[in-house]
């Protein structure tokens, strides 16, 4: 569904510029999932895309291909936004550009002020659609386009943190900014024990810099009778990207680490509880989504209901397929 607005100002006169601009202030994992849409805009325009993003995401953007981290107000040929928030709308209003388009996944997110900023509002429901595909579908309206899942270049060795392991390792990304997406510490501890008994490489624990994430990872480390290297909160973005890209396998709760692993073609088991796996995961070689069973038709699944032995079985299956 597309609405053409007349309230927003039209293309401005001036020196022609072919670069499109995108305003996107969502989190790290969401920004990874935007990569196919950015690549499609670059393909259509034949020029790099100027991406206005959260501060600090420059290393990720470096790995995206024909995408530029852009925080100046130089004129763009067109402007695209994918979130309804006021920060995005204000930035879009201030940026000089040709036609400005807002792409939404739910008509309920449309706000009164959007008509003063965007000439076009595109609404396409995305429930049950992999989010990267939904972003791509919003811009892929020309012949010759084909969806490819997010793909990132391999980070250079110079991005490695001093704490990076020197040998093989399995990355266990236990941290999440949302408590409801955390897998219980006792389940991680049980999984580590099972993997050690099976002869897997040493586990490396990771997570973000949030207090709850670091406490959760510390709890896992302290409860485990096995030695675990805990890097939760200890890495900058370059170090984290390097750590994910060099892992033999990643086991992660739904979030940035799983999206990065898929983009780097690193085998990954992603753990889902209350979030829908079809919204945030797409079938691909080496990528496994494991969802907790719902206790009832009107009750969302909980992470605690995802049994460690079930997770371990999937890890073994994935290891056999990829020779780990």
Image: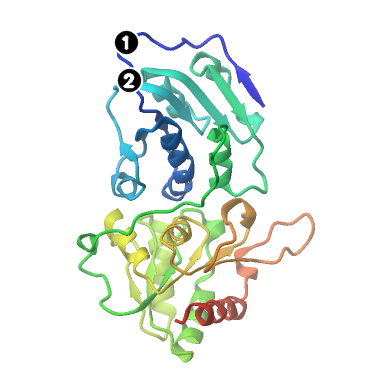
Q: In this orientation, which residue lies closer to the viewer: 164 or 147?
A: 147
> How is the model colour-coded?
rainbow
| Mark 2 crowd level (few <14, some 14–19, many ≥20, 10 Å Cα) | many
With respect to residue 144, does 247 lie above or below?
below
Q: In this orientation, which residue lies closer to the viewer: 13 or 91?
A: 13
State if disc 2 and disc 1 touch (CB < 8 Å): yes
With respect to residue 14, does 151 lie above or below?
below
The residue positioned farthest toward the front in the image shown: 144
Q: Which residue is mark 1?
A: 14
With respect to residue 30, does 47 lie above or below?
above
With respect to residue 138, does 252 lie above or below?
below
Is residue 192 shown to the viewer in this render?
yes
Residue 202, how many percent across, how many down?
Answer: 37, 81
Q: Which residue is mark 2?
A: 75
Residue 74, how many percent across, how many down?
Answer: 29, 22
Residue 282, picture quadrant: bottom right
User: Residue drawn 35% across and 40% down?
Assistant: 67
Is residue 276 shown to the viewer in this render?
no
Q: How many marks?
A: 2
Residue 132, how many percent across, how many down?
Answer: 53, 46
Image quarter hosting the N terminus? top right
Spatial separation of the CA atoms under disc 1 and disc 2: 9 Å
Per the image, label 2 sits on a secondary structure element best described as: loop
Residue 239, how many percent across, how many down?
Answer: 28, 60
In the picture, measured across the screen, residue 24 lies left or right of residue 308, that is left
User: Residue drawn 50% across and 12% down?
Assistant: 8
């Amino acid at each position: 569904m597309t609405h053409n607005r007349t309230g927003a100002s039209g293309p401005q006169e001036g020196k022609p510029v072919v670069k499109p601009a995108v305003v996107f202030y969502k989190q790290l994992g969401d920004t990874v999932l935007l990569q196919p849409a950015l690549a499609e805009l670059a393909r259509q325009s034949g020029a790099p895309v100027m991406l206005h993003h959260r501060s600090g995401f420059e290393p990720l953007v470096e790995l995206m291909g024909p995408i530029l981290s852009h925080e100046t107000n130089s004129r763009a040929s067109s402007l695209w936004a994918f979130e309804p928030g006021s920060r995005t709308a204000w930035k879009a209003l201030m940026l000089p550009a040709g036609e400005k388009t807002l792409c939404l996944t739910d008509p309920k997110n449309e706000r009164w002020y959007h008509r003063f900023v965007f000439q076009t509002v595109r609404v396409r429901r995305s429930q049950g659609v992999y989010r990267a595909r939904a972003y791509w579908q919003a811009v892929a309206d020309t012949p010759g386009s084909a969806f490819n899942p997010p793909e990132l270049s391999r980070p250079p060795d110079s991005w490695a943190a001093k704490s990076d392991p020197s040998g093989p390792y399995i990355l266990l990304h236990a941290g999440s900014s949302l408590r409801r997406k955390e897998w219980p510490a006792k389940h991680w501890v049980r999984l580590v024990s099972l993997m050690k008994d099976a002869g897997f490489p040493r586990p490396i624990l990771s997570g973000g810099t949030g207090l709850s994430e670091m406490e959760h990872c510390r709890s896992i480390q302290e409860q485990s009778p096995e030695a675990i290297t805990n890097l939760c909160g200890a890495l900058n973005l370059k170090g984290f990207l390097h750590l994910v890209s060099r892992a033999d396998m990643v086991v992660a709760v739904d979030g940035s680490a799983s999206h990065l692993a898929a983009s780097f073609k690193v085998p990954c088991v992603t753990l889902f509880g209350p979030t829908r796996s079809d919204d945030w995961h797409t079938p691909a070689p080496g990528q496994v989504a494991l969802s907790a069973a719902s206790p009832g038709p009107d009750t969302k699944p909980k992470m605690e209901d995802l049994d460690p032995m079930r997770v371990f079985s999937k890890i073994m299956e994935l290891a056999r397929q990829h020779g780990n």
